[in-house]
């Protein structure tokens, strides 16, 4: 994705030394001696999301029972989209500010081009892999059908056109198209921002409302995009809904929204919402409540039907938004100003281990697009491997840990290639 600059934070007291006169030569020395400390928060949480996304996409994975999606309304998709919005403010905000709207938008178009081809490449690699397994293997299941790709192979000509025009978006391949369309909305938002930040908020809100008209009593069917030509199925991730979260992250990093206050009251309210809403957003937690108190579960169950549209994932319902913002606020408090609580202090064995883990996780977060594409392909191969076993606890743990190691290797490999090591050092 993008290089990360510090999240907006309070200005530190420069101390008395800042009031002394410094010569240009001394200033050069100070700049060389005191490089900027990188804020680890954005990369850290993006990295965490990448590990969760891998776990979530391995077919039949025991570990998916313990990912965030099993305990509330929101999941790793929200982390990915929100952090992508923040990263985009860093990557493209400067281009708009320094180069103007036209060149800033040109850079966004170039990024959309990259994401589009990442999507196409991922589809063809996974489709080829599933076809190879079905063609050369003698397995109990049909891997092409497991991803509902039989329509593509049975009638490739129109589906190729649909694939390249994004009118054919199979379920497993729906996150990158959503991200691409949301990115394509950025020139609109940056143009509207000339009127005022309020105009950006209004535009984003109206686009979200078009995808979620139930909020004003206009029914459940809003603006969406077709996912396949032979049915009425729509994109699983509706970009008109999910752009709200993306531009929320963008607005925080751009400075359009002030950073939230550090408040014990807000922390308690956020934690209370996460805990009390769990039985309404998680079937696992609901079953726990039912086992402990059948009468309470009986009272909760009808609320699920009443809140269907409010917790809708495809169109990004408001309960998911509130749940994620509560979770993000607590994560922001835990990390501390500038991510200082994430950075290991001291020289104990625990501190050294955590420092190494932090380095690895943030590296994965820094290379999130490459890691995401790789992990989506890898997940299917890990699922195939597990199909050849009894999916015991130990073998499942091993498969997940090997997957983690491979996406870590992908992150370091992508970083190495991006560093252009073949160029002569000056």
Image (spheres, rainbow, N blue to C red):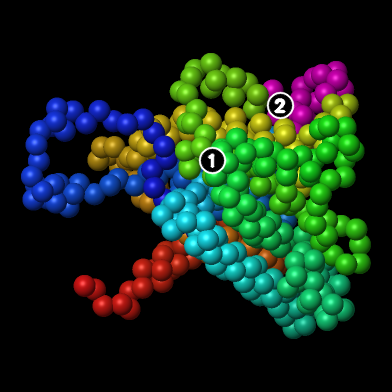
Q: Is residue 148 visible?
A: yes
Q: Measured along the vertical axis of the image, is residue 425 above or below residue 356? A: below
- Asked if the stretch drawn in magenta spans residue 36, the answer is no
Of the numbered discs in the image, which one, if any, rests on residue 251?
1
User: Main SS of the magenta segment?
Assistant: helix
Q: Is residue 286 magenta?
A: yes
- Disc 2 element: helix
Residue 96's label in the rendered image is: none
| Label 1 vs 2, first from the N-terminus | 1
Q: What residue is shown with label 2?
A: 277
> In terms of secondary structure, where does tag 1 sit?
helix
- In the depicted structure, whether residue 268 falls above or below residue 203: above
For the record, the magenta segment spans 276-300
Residue at (77%, 29%) from the top-left corner? 280
Q: Position of residue 253 (x, y in %)?
A: 48, 42
* Residue under the point 60% across and 46% down: 192
Q: Extreme front residue here?
A: 195
Residue 385 visible, this orientation = no
In which quadrant will I find the C terminus? bottom left
Q: Residue at x 39, y 33 (%)?
A: 9
Identity of the residue furthest to the bottom in this view: 136
Q: Residues within 10 Å of mark 1 (few under 14, many from 20)?
A: some
């Amino acid at each position: 994705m993008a290089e990360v600059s510090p999240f907006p934070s309070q200005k530190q007291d420069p101390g008395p030394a800042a009031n002394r006169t410094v010569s240009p030569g001394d200033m050069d020395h100070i700049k060389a001696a005191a490089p900027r400390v990188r804020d680890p928060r954005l990369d850290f949480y993006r990295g965490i999301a990448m590990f969760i996304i891998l776990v979530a996409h391995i077919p039949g994975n025991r570990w998916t029972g313990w990912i965030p999606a099993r305990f509330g309304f929101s999941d790793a998709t929200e982390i990915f989209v929100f952090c992508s919005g923040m990263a985009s403010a860093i990557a493209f905000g400067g281009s708009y500010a320094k180069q103007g709207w036209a060149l800033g938008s040109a850079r966004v178009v170039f990024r959309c081009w990259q994401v589009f081809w990442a999507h196409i490449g991922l589809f063809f690699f996974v489709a080829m892999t599933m076809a190879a397994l079905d063609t050369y293997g003698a397995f109990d299941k049909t891997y092409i059908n497991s991803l509902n790709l039989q329509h593509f192979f049975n009638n490739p000509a129109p589906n190729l056109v649909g694939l390249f025009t994004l009118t054919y978006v199979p379920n497993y391949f729906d996150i990158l198209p959503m991200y691409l369309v949301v990115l394509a909305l950025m020139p609109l938002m940056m143009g509207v921002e000339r009127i005022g930040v309020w105009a950006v908020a209004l535009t984003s809100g109206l686009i979200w409302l078009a995808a979620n008209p139930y909020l004003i009593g206009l029914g459940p069917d809003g603006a969406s995009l077709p996912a396949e030509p032979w049915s009425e199925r729509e994109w699983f991730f509706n970009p008109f809904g999910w752009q709200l979260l993306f531009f929320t992250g963008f607005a925080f990093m751009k400075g359009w929204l002030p950073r939230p206050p550090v408040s014990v009251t807000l922390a308690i309210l956020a934690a209370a919402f996460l805990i009390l809403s769990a039985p309404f957003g998680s079937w696992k937690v609901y079953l726990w409540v039912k086992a402990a108190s059948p009468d309470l579960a009986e009272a909760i169950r009808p609320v699920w039907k009443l809140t269907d549209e409010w917790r809708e994932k495809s169109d990004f319902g408001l309960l998911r938004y509130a749940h994620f913002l509560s979770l993000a606020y607590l994560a922001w408090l835990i990390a501390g100003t500038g991510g200082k609580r994430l950075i290991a202090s001291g020289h104990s064995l625990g501190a050294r281990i955590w420092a190494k883990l932090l380095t690895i996780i943030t590296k994965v977060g820094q290379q999130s697009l490459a890691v995401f594409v790789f992990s989506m392909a890898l997940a299917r191969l890990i699922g195939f491997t597990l199909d050849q076993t009894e999916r015991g606890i130990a073998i499942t743990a091993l498969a997940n840990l090997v997957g983690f190691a491979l996406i870590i290797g992908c992150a370091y490999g992508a970083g190495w290639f991006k560093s252009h090591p073949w160029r002569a050092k000056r």
